[in-house]
Image (cartoon, rainbow, N blue to C red):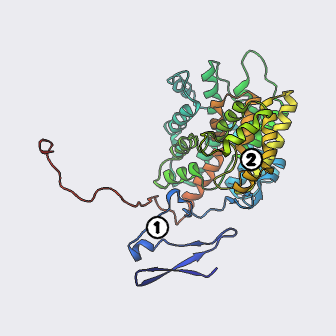
């Protein structure tokens, strides 16, 4: 592409530099557009706008590619573990054995919560949604950990990052325990990050909890597959909140609030509910016909993606994981049978192929989480747990970026023009 782009407005021409990344499409640098032309661009959803430079995650939706620091997501999910991927996202390179051991030890030593936070939980209604609790508790962390809120201090930023990654499983597990009326369990330092979370969620004080290695591996993969996903809505929210100089705990709480939306983090719950509605494989043709009917409100959930116009690379790993989990648990689930057959049909049906509606990561993850024993209200909380490392990595990158400015999108105003105030008695 040329090294500049030309724009004509009326009888005036303006040139803007074209920037190239290490991979992916070039971008037109329009930072001086308003100052030079007195016009803005109009881009609802910012789908054609790069809000930042980043070295963390790259997605090619047309080719179905997802890279973390250059490493393909399928390789990481199959060969790595969540602690190693967390280190990679935070630091830019895979750790050596000593670095990984030190990082894992650091995270493990930060997993406990301030004891007063247990009282904080008891202020919520017993039937509160776990995401409501997580928003509140994570936002409140800044009231308990004052020694890691100075964003100008790199050491404090890193301590805050470690604390957030370490404490999120404890926060999520306590939200679950509170909802079912069971006592909170403290972390156990001889367990892995994922094994510890499973024990804090499903263990009870009355008996020892044995971590199932198949379930542990499945959860670890789920965490890896959700760790980061470029400048999505919740990550952009974290960056936008952080651009004002807000403390890291407040920024991550903002990300959790955004993730809660059904169009973002709630998609796997919607996909599972759809599969349960279909119920069994023989009913699939009926529901596919309904999906093709423009006058029918039914929609197939878990297919297609805002970014991926090909098969979601995360879905391939998730499909394999679903089989492993259900085989290990001995579950013969008509919902999974329905999912498998529906996925096969979708890959062959002209309607799905034409519209590029391929199964995505949400299609399988809900089935896996349900089989493990998580209620659907916990699905988005688990997403938040996994995505915290991506949010933290993106937040750190933003704080260190010399070109970063406070976020201030513009608008196309369509309201009334200036008019005079009329006293209430004369209206």
Indicate left or right for 405 with 277 as reference: left
- Tell me which corner region of the image, top left, top right, bottom left or bottom right, holds residue 61: bottom right
Res 175 → quadrant: top right
Numbered badge on residue 359: 2
Residue visible at 64% across and 50% down in the picture: 390
Q: Is residue 247 left or right of residue 27?
A: left
- Looking at the image, is 96 positioned above or below residue 256? below
Quarter residue 239 falls in: bottom right
- The residue drawn where x is 40% and y is 61% is 412
Give the image location of residue 5, x and y in percent: 55, 79
Quick one: SS at disc 1?
loop
Q: Can residue 105 be seen in this view?
A: no
Which residue is at the front of the view, 275 or 12?
A: 275
Residue farthest top in this picture: 206
Q: How many marks?
A: 2
Q: Quadrant of the N terminus?
A: bottom right
Q: Residue 41 carries which label?
A: 1
Q: Which residue is drawn at 74% across and 32% down?
A: 196
Which of the two labelled residues, at mark 2 and mark 1, occupies the earlier sequence position?
Answer: 1
Q: For the residues marked 2 and 1, what is the alpha-carbon distance in whole angstroms?
A: 34 Å
Q: Position of residue 104 (x, y in %)?
A: 74, 43
Asked if disc 2 and disc 1 are in contact, CB closer than 8 Å, the reply is no
Q: State the mark number for residue 425.
A: none
Q: Which of 234 and 245 is in front in this view?
A: 234
Q: Can residue 181 be seen in this view?
A: yes
* Relative to 294, residue 406 above or below: below
Position in image of residue 192 (x %, y %):
77, 36
């Amino acid at each position: 592409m040329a090294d500049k782009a030309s724009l004509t407005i009326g009888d005036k021409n303006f040139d803007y530099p074209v920037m190239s990344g290490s991979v992916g499409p070039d971008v037109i640098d329009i930072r001086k557009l308003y100052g030079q032309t007195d016009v803005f661009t109009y881009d609802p959803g910012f789908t054609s706008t790069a809000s930042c430079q980043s070295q963390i995650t790259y997605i090619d939706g047309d080719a179905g590619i997802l890279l973390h620091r250059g490493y393909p997501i399928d390789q990481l999910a199959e060969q790595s573990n969540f602690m190693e991927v967390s280190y990679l996202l935070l630091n830019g390179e895979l750790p050596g054995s000593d670095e990984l051991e030190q990082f894992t030890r650091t995270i493990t030593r930060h997993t406990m919560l301030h004891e007063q936070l247990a009282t904080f939980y008891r202020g919520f209604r017993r039937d509160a949604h776990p995401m409501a609790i997580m928003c509140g508790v994570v936002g409140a962390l800044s009231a308990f950990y004052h020694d890691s809120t100075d964003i100008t201090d790199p050491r404090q930023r890193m301590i805050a990052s470690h604390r957030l990654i370490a404490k999120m499983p404890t926060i999520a597990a306590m939200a679950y325990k509170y909802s079912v009326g069971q006592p909170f369990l403290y972390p156990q330092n001889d367990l892995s990050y994922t094994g510890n979370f499973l024990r804090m969620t499903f263990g009870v004080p009355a008996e020892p909890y044995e971590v199932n290695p198949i379930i542990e591996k499945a959860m670890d993969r789920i965490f890896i597959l959700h760790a980061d996903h470029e400048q999505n809505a919740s990550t952009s929210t974290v960056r936008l909140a952080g651009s004002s100089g807000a403390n890291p705990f407040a920024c991550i709480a903002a990300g959790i609030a955004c993730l809660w939306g059904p169009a973002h983090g709630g998609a796997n719950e919607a996909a599972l509910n759809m599969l349960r509605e279909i119920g069994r494989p023989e009913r699939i043709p009926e529901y596919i016909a309904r999906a093709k009917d423009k006058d029918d409100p039914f929609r197939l959930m878990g297919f297609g993606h805002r970014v991926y116009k090909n098969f979601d690379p995360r879905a391939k790993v998730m499909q394999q994981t679903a089989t492993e989990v259900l085989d290990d648990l001995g579950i013969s689930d008509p919902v999974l049978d329905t999912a498998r057959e529906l996925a096969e049909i979708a890959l062959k049906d002209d309607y799905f192929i034409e519209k590029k509606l391929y199964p995505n990561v949400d299609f399988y993850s809900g089935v896996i989480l349900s089989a493990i024993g998580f209620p659907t209200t916990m699905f988005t909380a688990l997403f938040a747990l996994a995505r915290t490392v991506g949010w933290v990595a993106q937040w750190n990158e933003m704080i260190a970026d010399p070109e970063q400015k406070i976020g201030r999108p513009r608008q196309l105003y369509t309201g009334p023009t200036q008019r005079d105030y009329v006293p209430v008695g004369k209206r």
